[in-house]
Image (cartoon, rainbow, N blue to C red):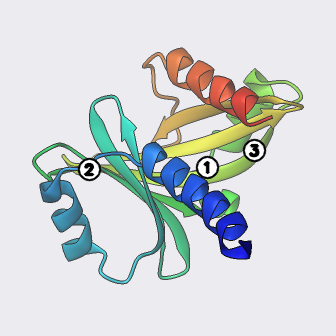
Amino acid sequence: MKARYFLIPLLLVSFTTFAQQVNIPKTAKDSFTKHYPKAAEVKWDKENGDYEASFKFNGKDMSVIFDKDGKTLETETAIEISQLPNGIEKYVRDNYKGFQITGAAEIIKSNGEKLYEAEVTKGNNKKDLFFDKNGKPEKKDLNKENEKENEEEDEED
């Protein structure tokens, strides 16, 4: 009788975990394993039709986006805020009054282009700002990405 009380919650947790998993193509998984064999705490998500693996590697938080064929589209590595290119902190102070830089990352696109991401926060408001390798703001519209991130955070609360 006691076993039933233990087994039912275990089955429910297992089913819930299984239902939340993303179906990742074998090509993407194989590419990930080849490049990051010692990755830890791997979590997969689907991002705009592609597949993102978030993980820890050599003590750093990282993420890699793969297409369905296993091609690496982008690699993102967390960095110290002090490692951001010159001018980014001043740009945030001048253009995002009251916001603080709370996180930073270096992004390498498949074409070799290097970008930097500065996560800025003011209260519950978070935005991801992107800059080129010289610290100049990227012109592309990232409002949709920031709105999506804020919606996901609201769902977690």
- Circle 3 residue: 101
Locate residue 14, reporting x and y percent.
Answer: 52, 59
Which mark is in front, 3 or 2?
A: 2
Task: Report the residue marked by disc 2.
Answer: 24
Q: Which residue is mark 1?
A: 86
Asked whether 116 or 38 is in front, the reply is 38
Helix, strand or loop at mark 3: strand
Left or right: residue 133 compared with residue 89: left
Which type of secondary structure does the marked residue at label 2 adopt? Answer: loop
Look at label 3 and name its amino acid. Ile
Numbered disc total: 3
Measure how far apart labels 3 and 2 are at the Cα level. Answer: 33 Å
Res. 69 in view: yes
Give the class, few, some or many, for how many residues have Cα within 10 Å of label 1's Cα (few <14, many ≥20).
few
| Residue 135 image offset from top left, x and y in percent | 53, 41
Q: Nearer the viewer, mark 2 or mark 1?
A: 2
Residue 84 showing in the rendered view: no
Amino acid type, label 1: Asn
